[in-house]
Image (cartoon, helix red, strand yellow):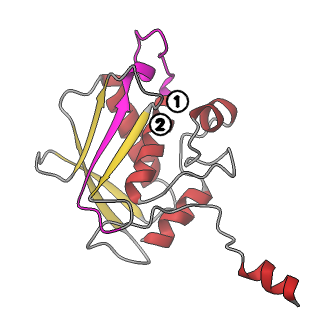
Amino acid sequence: MLLAVLIFSHNAFAYNLFGGRWPNQPHRGCCAQLSLYYSSGLKSYDKTGWQNGQNAWNASSANIVYLTTTDTSNPIYLQDGYYNNVSWDGVTYLYPCNSCTYSTANVVMNWYFTGRYSSVGSYSTGEIQSVAAHELGHLLGLAHNNLSSCVLMNGFTDQRWVQCQIKTPQSDDANGVNALY
């Protein structure tokens, strides 16, 4: 009997959540809508990656619709930059914290890795989309899931892209979003 209680009390979800979410969005059902502002200085290959990542989420079974805006006061800002002293190829900063209601976010792609002329870089178009879609997953409130290498929210690009060729949300990623929205 104790074994049955332990088995059924275990959280069966494979996705991980930060604990925060965007305000004024549905708690269940369809669909949360978030507007993305693309920095005017984006490298063309990173902008394409962001757009492809946005389209991948919009085409998924996740309860999310990403829109694009030209309103510079938009709270969600997509950008890129050259950071050669870090190990990340993308990062998402959610404000004010990771366990409350978000009000703003900066999402960054590192063209030290994605760039066409970096000694380390030259990510393929698919790999750049994988990074972008992954960061857009964080923007929704998803945390890393390193239990399965073949999900979008795996924190390691080498596992997510090189081993599995994942550049779109998988069912586990969509289930995590659907648990939030």
- Tell me the quadrant of the picture where the N terminus can be found: bottom right
- 33 or 123: nearer the eye? 123
In the rendered image, residue 120 lying in the magenta stretch gets the answer: yes
Occupied quadrant, residue 14: bottom right
In the rendered image, residue 140 lying in the magenta stretch gets the answer: no
- Name the secondary structure under disc 2: helix
Q: Residue 73 location, x and y as percent?
A: 11, 50
Please name the amino acid that badge 2 sits on: Val
- Tell me the quadrant of the picture where the C terminus can be found: bottom left
Q: Residue 150 location, x and y as percent?
A: 67, 45
Occupied quadrant, residue 65: bottom left
Pointer 2 with pointer 1, Cβ within 8 A: yes
Please name the amino acid that badge 1 sits on: Glu
- Residue lying furthest bottom in this view? 1
Q: Determine the residue positioned at 65% across, 36% down.
A: 159
**Position above or below: 176 against 146:** below
Residue 131's disc number: 2
Range of the magenta residues? 100-125
- 120 or 47: nearer the eye? 120
Q: Which residue is mark 1?
A: 127
148 on left or right of 70? right
The alpha-carbon separation of the residues under discs 2 and 1 comes to 6 Å
132 on left or right of 146? left
Q: Determine the residue positioned at 72% across, 75% down.
A: 10
Q: Determine the residue positioned at 59% across, 45% down.
A: 154
